[in-house]
Image: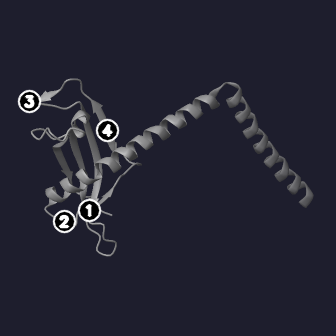
């Protein structure tokens, strides 16, 4: 009876394994694998761009969160990539003028602000910071009237309980 059970288990494993190989072969034959590769590469490039934007704007984000909370310990920034938040949004606006200032881009960051202290952890909130950006002005120091990067909106949400 024991050899019969062993052979049945072995046959079941072989059946399951061969079914997976068949699906993978069909997937490859239909050309889906190339699409999957391209989609994966695009997501990776988008993620690199978002990480680049976060690192580029980090001094501005920290400065504005400290100013908003009036607390110099508000230096810890986390990002909730898995949940509903779109951590970085970039919007291109053609010839947008506001208050006699021209900004071509709007960049929004959704961040979780905390104090960065492991022992006495304090979370301030999940906030959305909206900046207007004119890349042309970044390299032109002589233009003092209009900053290249300007905070235009700060939305605070209470922290979620741990």
Report the quarter where the N terminus lies: bottom right
Which label was assigned to residue 89? 4
The image quarter containing residue 117 is bottom left
Q: Identify whether 34 is placed above or below 118.
A: above
Q: Are marks 1 and 2 in contact (CB under 8 Å)?
A: yes
- Among all residues in the image, which is located at the extreme front? 142
Q: Residue at x 59, y 34 (%)?
A: 37
Left or right of 47 in this view: 156: left
Left or right of 86 in this view: 151: left
SS for callout 3: loop
To which residue does mark 3 refer? 100
Q: Do the residues labelled 2 and 4 touch (CB within 8 Å)?
A: no
Alpha carbon separation for disc pair 3 and 1: 33 Å
Alpha carbon separation for disc pair 4 and 1: 22 Å
To which residue does mark 2 refer? 72
SS for callout 4: strand
Report x, y in % for residue 10: 84, 51
Tell me how the rendering is colored. Answer: one colour
Alpha carbon separation for disc pair 1 and 2: 7 Å
């Amino acid at each position: 009876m024991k050899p019969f059970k062993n052979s049945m288990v072995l046959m079941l494993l072989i059946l399951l394994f061969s079914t997976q190989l068949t699906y993978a072969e069909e997937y490859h034959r239909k050309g889906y694998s190339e699409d999957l590769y391209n989609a994966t590469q695009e997501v990776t490039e988008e993620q690199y761009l978002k990480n680049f934007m976060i690192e580029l704007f980090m001094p501005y984000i920290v400065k504005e969160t400290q100013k908003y909370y009036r607390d110099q310990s508000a230096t810890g920034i986390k990002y909730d990539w898995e949940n509903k938040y779109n951590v970085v949004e970039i919007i291109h606006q053609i010839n947008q003028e506001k208050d006699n200032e021209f900004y071509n881009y709007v960049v929004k960051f959704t961040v979780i602000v905390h104090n960065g202290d492991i022992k006495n952890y304090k979370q301030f909130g999940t906030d959305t910071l909206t900046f207007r950006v004119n890349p042309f002005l970044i390299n032109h120091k002589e233009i003092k009237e209009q900053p290249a990067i300007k905070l235009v909106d700060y939305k605070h949400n209470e922290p979620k309980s741990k």
